[in-house]
Image: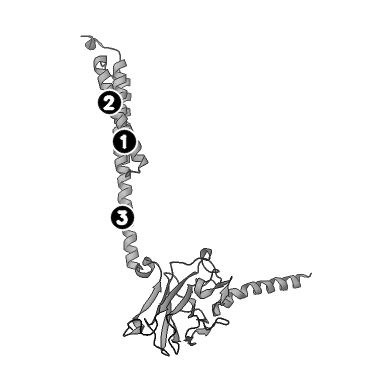
């Protein structure tokens, strides 16, 4: 096969593979991987093909109860912290009739479902209630926001929303239907979006708190190291220039060693408990320093008990 035909074949395959990706920008198919899109969403978008709480899918103008033959304008909106363009599909299980409006189209082979025909947001979808009472009418809505990469990748986010409009006479109708909005998304996504000023203030507060915590950690750790170094230095100079520790009579050394040993053992148990329970570092540091001081006390008792007696000790 010549190089020319090889390149032509590769280009043809690439276009065939890319066609479904870019074709969905004019509206998703009715089904994908045996999933009805408005009911179960589109698994080709997002991380792991799962619905995302990062997207807020809303539909406003939904009547609490419908009047037969009445037309309602449903407004479908998408919200995301980073992206504001995407698509949707809505279905009423063939109960009423959707009308095509700007930016929408009827989904083929769907029984009347409506979707976008180009990426956008804030679509107005007129829906006419059935001409007779059909009981409660259920709706399924799927929506997704896209990152603009042109491919259904992990940067896209989608979710689904199901809602019901009650049968005539079974609920109190709203005076202004346009004010009623149904949304799906987690609490932070719905109500916790913050301005740039709020985000910056929280960042500054976190930095200040980190500086405070790190400053305390460095200060007390450094102080502990200096105390330990001073004790070691004192021991060195005592042995080098002071002739070593003074003698402690055994009648005094034994009870002193027992007392200090018991205290040190208790502090060692407390230190282990502090580490195991992940006690705040400040408390753990204090317990550790007291334990080290107890160990040093036991050490000094043993050293003094073993020290040679001087003339003054024999008097």
Quarter of the picture containing the C terminus is top left
Q: Which mark is residue 49?
A: none
Q: Position of residue 199 (x, y in %)?
A: 35, 64
- Mark 3 crowdedness (10 Å alpha carbons): few <14, some 14-19, many ≥20: few
Q: Which of the marked residues, 2 or 1, is nearer the chain's N terminus?
A: 2
Which image quadrant for residue 164? bottom left
User: Which mark lies nearer to you, 2 or 1?
Assistant: 1
Given residues 120 and 67, the one toward you in this image is: 67
Given residues 305 and 62, the one toward you in this image is: 62
Q: Which of the marked residues, 3 or 1, is nearer the chain's N terminus?
A: 3
- Mark 2 crowdedness (10 Å alpha carbons): few <14, some 14-19, many ≥20: many
Q: Which of the marked residues, 3 or 2, is nearer the chain's N terminus?
A: 3
Q: Position of residue 220 (x, y in %)?
A: 30, 41
User: Which mark lies nearer to you, 3 or 1?
Assistant: 1
Given residues 226 and 206, the one toward you in this image is: 206
> Residue at label 3?
208
Given residues 2 and 89, the one toward you in this image is: 89
In the rendered view, tell whether residue 91 sits above or below residue 54: below
Which image quadrant for residue 244? top left
Secondary structure under badge 2? Answer: helix
- Mark 1 crowdedness (10 Å alpha carbons): few <14, some 14-19, many ≥20: some
> Residue at label 2?
260
In the rendered view, tell whether residue 252 sits above or below residue 193: above
Q: What residue appears at the point 31 percent right and 53 percent down from the top-left corner?
A: 209
Q: Furthest-right residue in view?
A: 1
Q: Position of residue 104 (x, y in %)?
A: 50, 84
> Residue at label 1?
270
Secondary structure under badge 1? Answer: helix
């Amino acid at each position: 096969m010549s190089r020319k035909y090889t390149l032509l074949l590769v280009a043809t395959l690439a276009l065939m593979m890319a066609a479904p990706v870019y074709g969905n920008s004019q509206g998703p198919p009715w089904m994908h991987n045996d999933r009805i899109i408005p009911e179960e969403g589109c698994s080709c978008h997002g991380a792991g093909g799962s619905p995302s709480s990062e997207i807020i899918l809303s539909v406003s103008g939904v009547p609490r109860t419908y009047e037969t033959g009445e037309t309602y304008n449903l407004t479908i909106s998408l919200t995301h912290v980073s992206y504001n363009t995407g698509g949707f599909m809505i279905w009423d299980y063939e109960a009423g009739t959707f009308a095509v409006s700007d930016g929408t189209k009827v989904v083929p082979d769907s029984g009347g479902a409506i979707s976008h025909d180009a990426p956008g947001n804030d679509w107005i979808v007129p829906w006419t209630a059935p001409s007779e009472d059909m009981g409660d009418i259920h709706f399924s809505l799927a929506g997704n926001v896209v990152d603009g990469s042109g491919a259904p990748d992990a940067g896209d986010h989608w979710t689904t929303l199901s809602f019901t409009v009650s049968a005539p006479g079974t609920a109190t109708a709203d005076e202004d239907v346009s004010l009623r909005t149904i949304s799906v998304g987690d609490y932070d996504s719905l109500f916790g979006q913050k301005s740039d000023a709020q985000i910056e203030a929280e960042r500054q507060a976190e930095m200040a708190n980190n500086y405070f915590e790190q400053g305390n950690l460095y200060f007390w750790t450094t102080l502990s190291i200096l105390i330990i170094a001073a004790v070691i230095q004192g021991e060195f100079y005592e042995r080098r220039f002071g002739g070593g520790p003074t003698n402690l009579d055994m009648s005094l050394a034994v009870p002193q060693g027992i007392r200090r040993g018991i205290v040190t053992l208790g502090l060692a148990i407390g230190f282990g408990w502090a580490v195991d329970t992940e006690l705040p570092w400040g408390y753990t540091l204090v317990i550790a320093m007291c334990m080290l001081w107890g160990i040093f006390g036991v050490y000094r008792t043993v050293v003094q008990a073993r020290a040679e007696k001087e003339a003054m000790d024999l008097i």
